[in-house]
Image: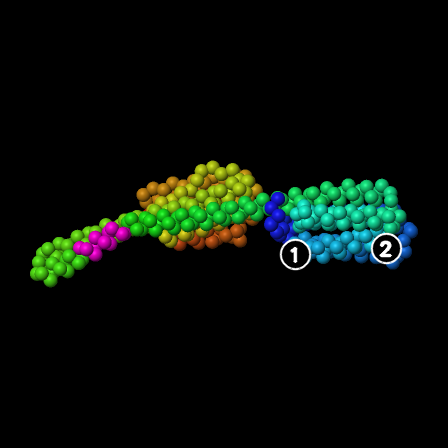
């Protein structure tokens, strides 16, 4: 394990149920208390409950703190557990939670002394309060040691996820740099020689004009115009290629997102030759539809279909399960408005699932 890795607050790495569900096992704290209830005074019973809730509050806060100040919580929780043992041997259910925090926040080297401290605290509690019986020592030790290693496993899992995210981010940065270099190289290859030719011909036309060779000068100027028109066309084609790649890259991300969320995806979406406005608007429409399926769909299969002709584009996104809340609040009204902006037609079918069908005419294509 990487010793330099700093464990983030546990609460930030897991969903809420990982914080609350394990606390159900602290209910064992009350089993011994219920058996000695009649031996305690009202004040002792109240203090026993206060100690329990103080421990729970401290444990929850400990999961939200950083590695730099976790030792305060570890020490405080151990003190609460030892002190509460004077009234209730059910504290054997609390010590394992402290061990889990130790395993998560500290490496083996730094966590071992803390684990030993907790084990000694358990033994001290048993000796000081005459609890040298199996019903206290055995459950406490059996639960505490495995919980420590469960904490280390949790730490290792989050560390691997962190390393994976860092690697993905690094790969994205490298891909961005490579793309910028490619664009710069393409522009240099495309414009470098052409602009040099334009400069030379323009200078030549200027000299010919001054020398009185008007026809020759006009011929050079005409060639400059031809070169410029050709270059302009090539630049537009190159920019269009970049834009097409960008929109299809975004569509691929949405496609992969559906798969990552557990959907079976059939078909794919690709576009070419759309106007800038059509690209951005259709991307927003598809993103909204994809988000609706992920958040609200009760099905598992998604069909993607696109048919692009010279004067028409048809798009269909279907899911075999109905949306749990297929209302305008899901953005369906926004989708319809965007389709209308492009002069398209919008159809929403809810029979045997959910299907969004869109059709656009030639106005969305580049001239």
Under circle 2, the secondary element is helix
Query: Can see residue 276?
Result: yes
Q: Residue at x 74, y 43 (%)?
A: 145
Q: Nearer the viewer, residue 180 or 248?
A: 180
Q: Nearer the viewer, residue 84 or 130?
A: 130
Query: Can see residue 354?
Result: no
Residue corresponding to mark 1: 68
Kindly report the secondary structure that dominates the magenta region of the rendered protein: helix
Residue corresponding to mark 2: 45
Position above or below: 248 against 209: above
Bin the neighbour count of mark 2 within 10 Å (Cα to Cα): few under 14, some 14-19, many 20 and up.
some
Residue 40 at x, y = what percent? 90, 53
Residue 169 at x, y = what percent? 50, 49
Residue 366 at x, y = what percent? 32, 49
Bin the neighbour count of mark 1 within 10 Å (Cα to Cα): few under 14, some 14-19, many 20 and up.
few
Residue 122 covered by magenta stretch: no
Q: CA distance from mark 2 to mark 1?
A: 35 Å
Residue 151 at x, y = what percent? 68, 45
Q: Residue at x 75, y 44 (%)?
A: 144
Query: Mark 2 or mark 1, which has the lower sequence index?
Result: 2
Q: Identify the mark at residue 363; answer none if there is no mark.
A: none
Range of magenta residues: 191-201
């Amino acid at each position: 394990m990487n010793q330099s890795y700093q464990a983030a607050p546990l609460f930030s790495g897991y969903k809420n149920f990982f914080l609350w569900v394990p606390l159900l096992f602290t209910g064992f704290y009350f089993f011994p208390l219920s058996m000695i209830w009649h031996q305690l005074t009202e004040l002792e019973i109240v203090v026993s409950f206060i100690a329990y809730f103080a421990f729970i509050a401290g444990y929850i806060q400990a999961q939200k703190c950083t590695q730099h100040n976790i030792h305060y919580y570890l020490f405080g929780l151990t003190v609460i557990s030892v002190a509460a043992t004077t009234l209730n041997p059910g504290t054997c259910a609390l010590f394992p939670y402290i061990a889990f925090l130790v395993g998560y926040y500290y490496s083996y080297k730094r966590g071992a002394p803390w684990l030993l401290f907790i084990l000694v605290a358990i033994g001290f509690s048993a000796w000081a309060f005459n609890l040298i019986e199996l019903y206290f020592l055995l459950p406490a030790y059996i639960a505490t040691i495995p919980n420590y290693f469960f904490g280390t496993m949790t730490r290792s899992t989050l560390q691997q996820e962190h390393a994976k995210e860092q690697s993905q981010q690094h790969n994205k940065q490298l891909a961005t740099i490579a793309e910028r270099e490619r664009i710069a190289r393409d522009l240099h290859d495309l414009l470098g020689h052409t602009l040099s030719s334009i400069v030379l011909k323009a200078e030549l036309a200027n000299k010919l004009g001054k020398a009185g060779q008007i026809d020759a000068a006009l011929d050079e100027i005409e060639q400059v115009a031809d070169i410029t028109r050709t270059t302009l066309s090539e630049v537009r084609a190159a920019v269009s290629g970049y834009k097409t790649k960008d929109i299809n890259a975004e569509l691929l991300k949405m496609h992969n997102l559906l798969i990552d969320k557990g959907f079976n995806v059939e078909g794919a979406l690709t576009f070419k030759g759309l106007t800038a406005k059509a690209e951005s608007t259709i991307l927003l429409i598809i993103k909204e539809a994809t988000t609706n399926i992920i958040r609200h769909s009760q099905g598992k299969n998604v069909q993607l279909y696109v048919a692009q002709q010279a004067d028409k584009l048809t798009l269909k996104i279907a899911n075999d399960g109905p949306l749990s809340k297929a209302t305008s609040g899901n953005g369906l009204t926004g989708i319809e408005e965007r389709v209308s902006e492009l002069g398209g037609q919008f159809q929403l079918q809810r029979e045997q699932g959910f299907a969004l069908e869109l059709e656009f005419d030639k106005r969305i294509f580049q001239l």
